[in-house]
Each structure stands twice: as C-alpha cells, then as structure tokens.
Image (cartoon, rainbow, N blue to C red):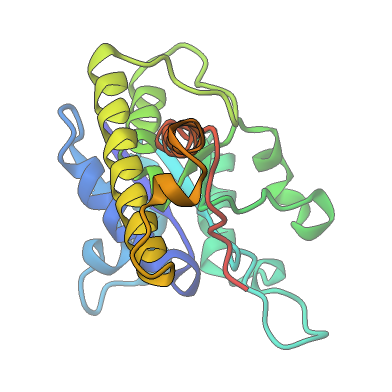
C-alpha cells in the first residue's frame, strides 16, 4: 500500500507529520509520500508530485481550517490558482481515478462547491473521515480500517464498534478524570469555606452523592466522546 498525503503546509503541517508517522508504522504500508521528506533537493516539484501520485494506491486529502489557502481580504484563495500545488495534487488524484479520502482535521468543515474550482468538485462526493487531536489514536484506527478494507468506510460522525479493551480503557479513563475533578473541587471548597467538608456544604451524603454521580457521568461522556470539547481556533 502506497499512501499519498495531500495537505497545505500552513494549514496542517504538524498534524500531517504526526499522521504520516503513524501510517508508516502500519503493517502493509509500503510508503507514505510527504513532500518535505519525499522530494530530494533539486528535484522538479511538479514532476515528482505527478510521479508519486501515479504510484500511489490511495490519496488522503487533509483538510483543516485554512486548506483553501485564504489570503488577504478580497483576494481569491490559493485553491483557485491553477499553479496551486494542493489543487494540482487533488486534481491529479481525481484524474487518475485514485481512491481519494478527504480527512477533516479537528472538526474542520468540508469546502462547499462554490469554494472549489470545477475540477475539484468530485472531491465533495467522496466520503470523509475525521482525525482529531483529542481522539487521534481512535480516529487513525478508523482511518486505517477504511484504507485497508474494501467495505464502505464509516460515515462521517458514525462511531466504530467498540471493543472490550477499548471500552475498559475508556471506563477507567473516565473514572480517573472524575476522581481528579472531585479532589480538585473538594480542595477548592475546603479552602474557600474555611475548612468545611464538601459533604457539609452540600447538605449531607445525598447532596454529595448527586455531585459524584453528575461528575462521573460527565467524565464518562467525555471519555467516550459523547461530549466533545470545542477545539476550533478563533
């Protein structure tokens, strides 16, 4: 399996490098093409991109908030320029009828049809997957399944079936978060109340029990991804 990573450097350089390292370690992956590592000094950039795309089995299009290549206000984004390398890569992958998977980084949105040149419109018909910092390992596992298996990849927002080990780890993680949060709340309340216990402040064991249940439920929801923390930069 040869994987081509198409990305914009000022949009997703760090996330792409992290993903490339993880994909390169997967059994069955022969090569991961990443421009900064795979193009030698003095080599013709467009020619190398085209040859690498021709050899690739699959192209992952990594899309972050700045993937379109926005410039100053009023100016067209870089994706609208014929000489834009990201546009060239995606267009070549589509032209060669490669398997193309859009990968949305950290809750980024898919571009709309009016934001893309016509030759890239077929990208919008491809099923997209998420790769997020907060659930990176889980998301890469879903992505690797989509890469290596012929069946339809999980739809955007659809969760992979949990394994027993995965559920156990997340339960323990949620429990650990709840204990830490309760300790922090207890220390803060003890300090601010002049030495009163949290149980006393909440009116007895019933109040304390409700707080424990609420925090435990919240932490488990965070651990299983039912509730997600906002990650979008402003």
Pick the front one: 217 or 169: 217
Q: Closest to the observer: 186 or 174?
A: 186
The x and y percentages for residue 60 are 44, 44
Q: Is residue 231 above or below residue 77?
A: above
Q: Nearer the viewer, residue 39 or 149?
A: 149
Q: Is residue 14 left or right of residue 24?
A: right
Of 18 and 116, nearer the camera is 18
Q: In which quadrant of the rendered image does the N terminus lie?
A: top left
Q: Residue 58, located in which quarter of the rendered image?
A: top left
Residue 67 spot, x, y in % from top left: 58, 63
Q: Position of residue 214 (x, y in %)?
A: 51, 35
Residue 192 image-quadrant placement? bottom left
Any part of residue 53 in sight: no
Image quarter in which the C terminus is found: bottom right
Q: Residue at the spot x=71%, y=50% of the render?
A: 119
At x 15%, y 28%, the residue is 27
Residue 218 in view, yes or no: yes
Total residue callouts: 0
- Residue sitting at x 42%, y 32%: 220
Give the residue drawn at x 41%, y 44%.
199
Is the residue 162 above or below the residue 139 in the image? above
Residue 176 point in image, percent of width and height: 26, 40
């Amino acid at each position: 399996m040869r994987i081509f990573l198409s990305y914009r450097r000022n949009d997703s350089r760090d996330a792409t490098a992290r993903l490339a390292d993880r994909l390169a370690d997967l059994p069955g992956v022969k090569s991961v093409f990443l421009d900064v590592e795979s193009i030698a000094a003095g080599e013709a950039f467009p020619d190398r991109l085209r040859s690498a795309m021709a050899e690739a089995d699959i192209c992952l299009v990594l899309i972050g908030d700045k993937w379109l290549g926005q410039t100053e206000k009023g100016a067209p984004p870089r994706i609208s320029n014929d000489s834009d390398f990201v546009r060239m890569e995606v267009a070549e992958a589509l032209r060669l009828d490669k398997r193309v998977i859009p990968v949305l980084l950290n809750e980024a949105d898919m571009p709309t049809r009016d934001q893309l040149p016509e030759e890239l419109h077929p990208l919008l018909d491809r099923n997209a997957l998420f790769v997020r910092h907060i659930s990176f390992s889980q998301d890469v596992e879903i992505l690797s399944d989509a890469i290596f298996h012929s069946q339809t990849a999980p739809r955007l927002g659809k969760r992979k079936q949990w394994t027993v080990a995965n559920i156990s780890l997340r339960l323990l993680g949620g429990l650990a978060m709840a204990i830490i949060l309760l300790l922090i709340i207890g220390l803060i309340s003890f300090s601010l109340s002049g030495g009163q216990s949290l149980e006393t402040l909440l009116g007895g064991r019933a109040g304390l029990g409700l707080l424990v249940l609420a925090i435990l439920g919240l932490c488990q929801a965070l651990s299983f991804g039912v509730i997600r923390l906002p990650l979008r930069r402003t």
